[in-house]
Image: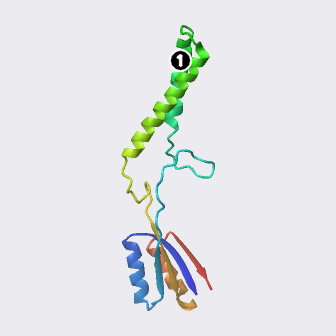
Amino acid sequence: MQIYATFEYSTRLEIAITKLEKMGISEIFAVPLDNGPEDIEIFDTIHRSDGKSLLSKGMILAVFFSVIGASRGFKLHWGPIIWGLIGAAFGFILGFCIDLYIHSKKPKNRKALKGKTSEVIIIINCKNSEKRDVERILWEQLAVGVGKTE
């Protein structure tokens, strides 16, 4: 029988493995999971959003500068529509550059995502008679999840 469990990487994981080895179970396989790279994407899609868009300040400043450009455009030569579009383009480029500068200054070598730690999957080969004790040990040591196959 195989029992699968996931743990956050902590001392509880080490204690669980030690207790299982003391029970006489020698076939324990642990696989640590990596957090994916935290890359910044300019465009968020419907399927993936990291919450760090480089377009948000650009859109806000585009609206702000287009309103100012359109209101001032009534007194200027090209008129309110052209000056509104010029203001929107200027505001968007300014906001995009500000966001790009802010995100480029953050440290790039952060491995862990905010608030999340990597997990470890443990695969335990044991006899059916040991199943109950193994599960009890895993749950006592705060396993995130436990599954079994026969």
Element class at badge 1: helix
Q: Is residue 48 above or below residue 27?
A: above
Q: Residue at x 52, y 48 (%)?
A: 41
Within 10 Å of disc 1 (Cα), the crowding (few <14, some 14-19, many 20+) is many
Q: Residue at x 56, y 9 (%)?
A: 77
Which percent across, then down, holds residue 58? 51, 33
Q: Quadrant of the C terminus?
A: bottom right
Amino acid, disc 1? Gly
**Quarter-of-image position of residue 19:** bottom left
**Quarter-of-image position of residue 11:** bottom left
Asked whether, in this view, residue 14 is left or right of residue 47, the answer is: left
Q: Residue at x 38, y 56 (%)?
A: 110
Q: 137 or 58: which is nearer to us?
A: 58
Q: Quadrant of the N terminus?
A: bottom right
Q: Is residue 107 above or below residue 90?
A: below
- Determine which residue is flagged by label 1: 69
